[in-house]
Amino acid sequence: MARRYVVGVGADGLGAELKNLIRDRLRDHPRVAEVVDFGVGDPSDSCEYPRVGIQVAEAVASGAIDRAVLVCGTGIGMAISANKVRGVRATVAYDPYSVERSVLSNNCQVLCLGARVVGPELAWYVVRQWLTYEFDPSSPSAHKIQLICDYEQGHLTNSGGDS
């Protein structure tokens, strides 16, 4: 049986409606054991996207959740915010190949979507597809991910080439 994930969801006011739709559908998805909603719940909420993005990414980094879906206007701000948290790899992706490679090549735990960029059905399709992939730690990409992790930990100082 495939692994089941604890998935966090979060949004700012611009992404609240799409986040709520994804949250509700995730609850019935066979790859999802639990959904943790970090808010915001309503489009009128003025909470800034970095606050939500960082909070959710910290939950991923600590292991409290396995993966997360973040939604703002474009997805870009959420991805930038989440990527500031050590150990987290977040991406904006809408096409099948990028979604696949975000996990298989880059071990991204956070998928960011833009409510002003993608419609609800395409967003749900992308989330479902993203949940089907699992990073293989024995893949050729594992060394590259390790280089990123080493840099985050301060163990890689020569960014100009292999060490």
Image: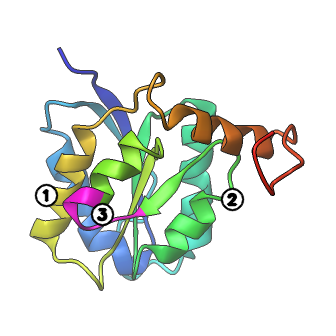
| Residue 87 can be seen in this image | yes
Q: CA distance from mark 1 to mark 2?
A: 27 Å
> Magenta residues?
92-97
Residues at badges 3 and 2 in contact (C-beta under 8 Å)? no
Neighbour tally class for label 3: few under 14, some 14-19, many 20 plus, Cα within 10 Å? many
Which residue is at a point 71% across and 46% down the rendered structure image? 86
Rate crowding at label 1 as few (under 14), some (14 to 19) or many (20 or more) other CA atoms within 10 Å. Answer: few
Q: Are marks 1 and 3 in contact (CB under 8 Å)?
A: no
Q: Measure how far apart labels 3 and 2 are at the Cα level.
A: 21 Å
Work out whether 79 lies above or below 142: below
Which numbered circle lies on residue 125? 1
Label at residue 63: none
Pointer 3 residue: 19
163 vs 82, nearest the viewer: 163
Expressed as whole percent of the image width and height from the top left, the position of residue 89 reads 55, 50
Horizontal and vertical percent position of residue 110:
45, 51
Residue at image point 60% right, 41% down: 144
In the displayed structure, 122 sits above or below 73; it is: above
Whole-percent x, y for residue 24 in the image: 18, 51
Q: Secondary structure at mark 2?
A: loop
Q: Quadrant of the C terminus?
A: top right
From the viewer's perspective, is 129 left or right of 4? left
The 10 Å Cα crowd at callout 2, few under 14, some 14 to 19, many 20 or more, is some
Residue 136 falls in which quadrant of the image? top left
What color scheme is it? rainbow
Q: Which residue carries the number 2 mark?
A: 84
